[in-house]
């Protein structure tokens, strides 16, 4: 009797056994359809011994319905799924679901009908039709996609099809991608770059696991260098995965890639169209997709012939996923490379302390690109002590920084102001009664956005219009904005330098790839004098005329629930400082601070990276923090405040007594209310030797909890809110 065990995507079910019907060939890793009650479910065939469950008698087994037309998941990928679930205390099915990230792809080859404008006009023009036609210029997509782009109903679009204004196009879902050419346009590398590139190429040829830290200051040409490793993988017919931290960055990256290899790579992130997602998934699984550039979710795709993984800007916090499966894509990338037996390159100008430590103890190979490429020198850095050099009342830029902007404007050079805070003001209050606008679903102030005239919560997305009168006391014109966001800085620049052409760069303004591309084009054409932005501007951009960078508030990163606050401040400011002086002209960086004596600020001013890392390493060693010890967080939440508190208390009472684990809490989380759920948390500090995950699993398994309570485990947490 031929039977198989399936991993299925239903959290309430364990593994299920099925009978393989006569004549059906089923390999481990195969994606199959199986009956469950009256429905059909999808499952992955798994090794029985690795997925223990209660045995079911042969005669009670139902037959599999069929094998889906996709290649079976490789043993290497199955081991990665197991490792990820085990390490992050996550359900196996939740991890496996990230692999099967396109439902359409599982149905096999197909064509879809997309629509595009014909250039014709409808017999009768209505405002909706007019709007749709304007919005759909140059677009092609399914009815649903076009309806969301044009913000009109599908009915309106069907009307336009009937009128011949939109025409259907049959699209082959699996049409091949244009081929990247390894030797399309080889670059001229500096001596240092060529040396590092040769080591990377060698690692690709060796086709063995090799974790490499590519450590190079901003502007040292890391991308050109690892592109040579990409070229080597292309020559040997193997696939490459490049992980990038921000979708907004991909546009600039795609341009550089196309220049080097002749075509754009295959792109993967949450915002791609479902047809593109399906096409990419199938090409990745067949091995036809040569180079995939994507957000962290691209890490779990079923590459057929992976030859190299690159994690660019590897220190970035956005590689950490804080919902669902709480994993760190940088760390999982290293594990994937280990299972696939390929090199993995972590590229950064400001590596995470954990990565540097791995290089120091010899686990990672470290390749250094010290010099800036070409003539450019590192910028001079100066502190502006805001307690001494005070901005004028109601302003946020100190006189010296304002003068610096004026000088650059006069000379026709560009400046950049960095403040990592979206919106106009982080807090709005009533000057009459003291009322503060707070999110009804979260412990957070509502942030005023003047561009959209709204107050919005940056945690749950709750939005409301800015009212005319105070909702508490009814007083008119009594609302005051407290503190600056980037929009307010842009207003200040417009006041002091009305003739300057400015650009506001935040996720609110650069929310689509074409907007990012338009901004880059304008900045490069010198149509922008002053760029004002959030952390989006700290990396990826290369503007030769940019000679002044102003950090509006270097202390901001030191506040809040970030467990690596000092490191994050160092990274952000060092990255944004790296935007200055990338051309022929020298750059200058002014850092505004109220804490000029803080170790991280002193190290920044001295541009002394080694001093910063040495101080931070010592602080972490003393605190038993990563990489010297480990952290985990347990977050207990419920819509009912008392229920959440009681559940956290019960979990706290059941804590294991282990000498190598220190457990703090339970306590209300700093974000005590998030998206309508009350939150309590416990923090665990473990010695490196402790079997942390096993301890947490057996601890939580013993505590029965009501249905409304959710318990999340965050291994190696970044944020502590
Ligand atoms: Zn009031
Ligand atoms: Zn909220």
Image: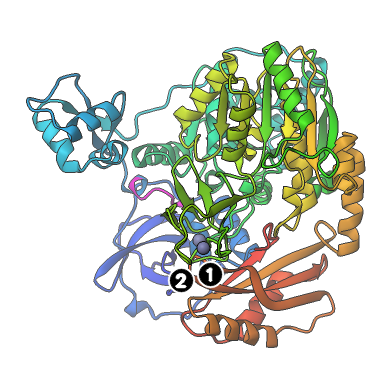
Which span of residues is magenta-colored?
99-104
- Identify residue for label 2: 15
**Where is residue 372 shown, x and y percent of the image?**
79, 21
Work out which quarter of the rendered image holds the C terminus and state it. Answer: bottom right
Q: Looking at the image, do the residues carrying marks 1 and 2 touch, with CB atoms under 8 Å apart?
A: yes
In terms of depth relative to the viewer, which is nearer, 300 or 149? 149
Q: CA distance from mark 1 to mark 2?
A: 7 Å
In terms of depth relative to the viewer, which is nearer, 249 or 534? 534
Classify residue 683 by image quadrant: bottom right
- Identify residue for label 1: 51
Q: Is residue 258 above or below residue 75?
A: above
Colour scheme of this structure image? Answer: rainbow
Q: Is residue 55 above or below residue 473?
A: below
Classify residue 689 by image quadrant: bottom right
Q: Earlier in the sequence, mark 1 or mark 2?
A: 2
Label 1 secondary element: loop
* Mark 1 closeness class: few <14, some 14–19, many ≥20 residues within 10 Å: some
Residue sitting at x 52%, y 59%? 95
Residue sitting at x 42%, y 39%? 272
């Amino acid at each position: 009797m031929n039977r198989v065990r399936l991993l299925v995507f239903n959290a309430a079910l364990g593994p299920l056994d099925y009978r393989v019907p006569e004549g059906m060939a089923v390999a481990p890793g195969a994606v199959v359809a199986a009956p469950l009650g009256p429905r059909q479910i999808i499952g992955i065939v798994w090794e029985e011994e690795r997925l223990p469950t209660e045995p079911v008698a042969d005669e009670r087994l139902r037959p599999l319905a069929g094998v889906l037309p996709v290649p079976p998941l490789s043993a290497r990928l199955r081991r990665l799924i197991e490792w990820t679930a085990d390490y992050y205390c996550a359900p196996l099915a939740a991890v496996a679901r990230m692999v099967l990230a396109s439902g359409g792809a599982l149905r096999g080859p197909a064509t879809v009908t997309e629509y595009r404008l014909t250039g014709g006009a409808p017999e009768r023009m209505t405002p909706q039709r007019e709007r749709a036609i304007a919005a759909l210029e140059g677009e092609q997509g399914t009815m649903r996609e076009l309806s969301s782009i044009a913000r009109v109903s599908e009915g309106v679009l069907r009307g336009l099809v009937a009128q011949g204004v939109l025409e259907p196009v049959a699209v082959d879902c699996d049409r091949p991608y244009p081929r990247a050419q390894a030797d399309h346009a080889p670059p001229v590398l500096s001596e240092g770059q060529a040396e590092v590139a040769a080591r990377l190429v060698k690692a690709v040829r060796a086709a063995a696991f090799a974790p490499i830290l590519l450590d190079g200051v901003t502007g040292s040409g890391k991308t050109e260098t690892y592109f040579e490793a990409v070229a080597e993988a292309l020559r040997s017919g193997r696939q490459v995965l490049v992980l990038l931290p921000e979708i907004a960055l991909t546009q600039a990256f795609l341009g550089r890639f196309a220049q080097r290899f002749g075509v754009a790579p295959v792109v993967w992130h949450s915002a791609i169209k479902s047809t593109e997602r399906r096409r990419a998934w199938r090409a990745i699984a067949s091995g036809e997709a040569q180079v995939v550039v994507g957000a962290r979710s691209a890490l779990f795709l079923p590459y057929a012939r992976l030859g190299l993984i690159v994690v660019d800007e590897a220190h970035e916090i956005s590689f950490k996923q804080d919902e669902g499966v709480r994993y760190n894509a940088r760390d999982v990338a290293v594990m994937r490379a280990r299972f696939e037996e390929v090199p993995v390159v972590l590229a950064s100008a400001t590596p995470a302390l954990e990565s540097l430590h791995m290089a120091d103890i010899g686990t990672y190979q470290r390749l250094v690109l010290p010099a800036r490429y070409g003539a450019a020198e590192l910028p001079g850095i100066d502190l502006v002590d805001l307690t001494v050099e005070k901005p004028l009342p109601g302003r946020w830029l100190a006189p010296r920084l304002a003068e610096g902007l004026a000088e650059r404007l006069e000379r026709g050079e560009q400046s950049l102001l960095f403040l990592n805070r979206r919106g106009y003001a982080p807090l709005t209050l009533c000057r009459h009664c003291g009322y503060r606008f707070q999110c009804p679903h979260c412990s957070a102030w509502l942030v005023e956005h003047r561009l959209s005239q709204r107050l919005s919560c940056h945690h749950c997305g709750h939005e409301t219009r800015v009212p005319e009168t105070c909702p508490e006391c009814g007083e008119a014109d009594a609302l005051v904005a407290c503190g600056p966001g980037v929009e307010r800085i842009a207003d200040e620049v417009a006041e002091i330098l009305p003739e300057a052409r400015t650009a506001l760069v935040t996720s609110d303004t650069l929310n689509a790839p074409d907007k990012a591309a338009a901004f880059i084009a304008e900045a490069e054409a010198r149509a922008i004098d002053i760029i004002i932005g959030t952390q989006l501007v700290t990396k990826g951009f290369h503007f030769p005329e940019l000679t002044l960078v102003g950090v509006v508030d270097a202390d901001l990163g030191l506040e809040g629930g970030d467990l690596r606050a000092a490191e994050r401040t160092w990274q952000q400011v060092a990255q944004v400082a790296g935007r200055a002086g990338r051309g022929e002209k020298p750059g200058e960086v002014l850092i505004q601070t109220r804490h000029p004596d803080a170790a991280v600020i002193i190290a920044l001013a001295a541009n002394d990276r080694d001093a910063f890392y040495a101080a931070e390493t010592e602080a972490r060693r003393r605190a038993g923090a990563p990489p010297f010890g480990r952290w985990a967080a347990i977050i207990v939440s419920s819509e009912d405040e008392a229920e959440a508190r009681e559940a956290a208390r019960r979990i706290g009472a059941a804590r294991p007594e282990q000498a190598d684990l220190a457990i703090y809490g339970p306590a209300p989380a700093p974000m005590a209310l998030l998206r309508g759920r009350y939150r309590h948390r416990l923090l665990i500090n473990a010695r490196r030797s402790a079997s942390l995950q096993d301890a947490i699993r057996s601890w939580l398994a013993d505590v029965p909890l009501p249905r409304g309570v959710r318990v999340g485990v965050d291994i190696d947490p970044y944020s502590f809110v």
